[in-house]
Image (tube, grey):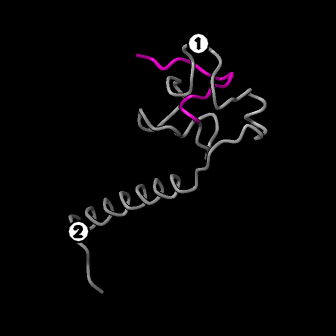
Amino acid sequence: MKSVNRRDFLKLSGSTVIGLTLGSTVLKAQAQEQLSADDATAKALKYTPNSTVDGANCANCMYVQGTDGEQHRPCNIFPGKLVSADGWCSAWVKKPG
């Protein structure tokens, strides 16, 4: 049996954590689908893919994740779903800054 020194162990441990984190992120990104207005949570929060509230939309909400400019992005309110940047729901809160 080969002994592992501390330096090799730390390299291996760090690589494993990074691999698991990146792998998890990739799987989450692939599993997401667009939020349907027929979704039970969407109905409860009055989600609409086209906001009718001046100055309020998913693109400027604090719960939306992802990169600015993307048309569909993940939202903390609707896990595993992508919302329209032009959308709105009753949980909307203006993004700070």
When asked about the image quadrant of residue 40, the answer is top right
Under circle 1, the secondary element is loop
Task: Residue at 40%, 56% (x, y): give it.
Answer: 22
Give how far across and how far down residue 97 sits, in percent.
40, 16
Left or right? Give the position of 71 relative to 16. Answer: right
Q: Distance between the residues labelled 2 and 1?
A: 57 Å
Depth check: 34 or 20 in front?
A: 34
Mark 2 and mark 1 lie on one chain; the one further toward the N terminus is 2
Q: Main secondary structure of the magenta part?
A: loop
Residue 54, numbered label: 1
Numbered disc 2: secondary structure: helix
Q: Where is residue 96 in the image (x, y as percent from the top left)?
A: 45, 17
- Amino acid at the residue labelled 1: Asp
User: Which stretch did the figure color magenta?
Assistant: 84-97
Screen quadrant of the N terminus: bottom left
* Residue 93 horizontal side relative to residue 41, left or right: left
* Contact check, label 2 and label 1, Cβ < 8 Å: no
Q: Closest to the observer: 91 or 11?
A: 91
- Where, by quadrant of the figure, is residue 41 drawn? top right
Res 90 → quadrant:
top right
Q: Is residue 49 above or below residue 17?
A: above
For label 2, the crowd category at 10 Å Cα-Cα, with few meaning under 14, some 14 to 19 and many 20 or more, is few
Residue 25 or residue 32, whichever sits in front = 32
Give whichever of 32, 54 is nearer the camera.
54
Instruction: Report the disc number at residue 8.
Output: 2
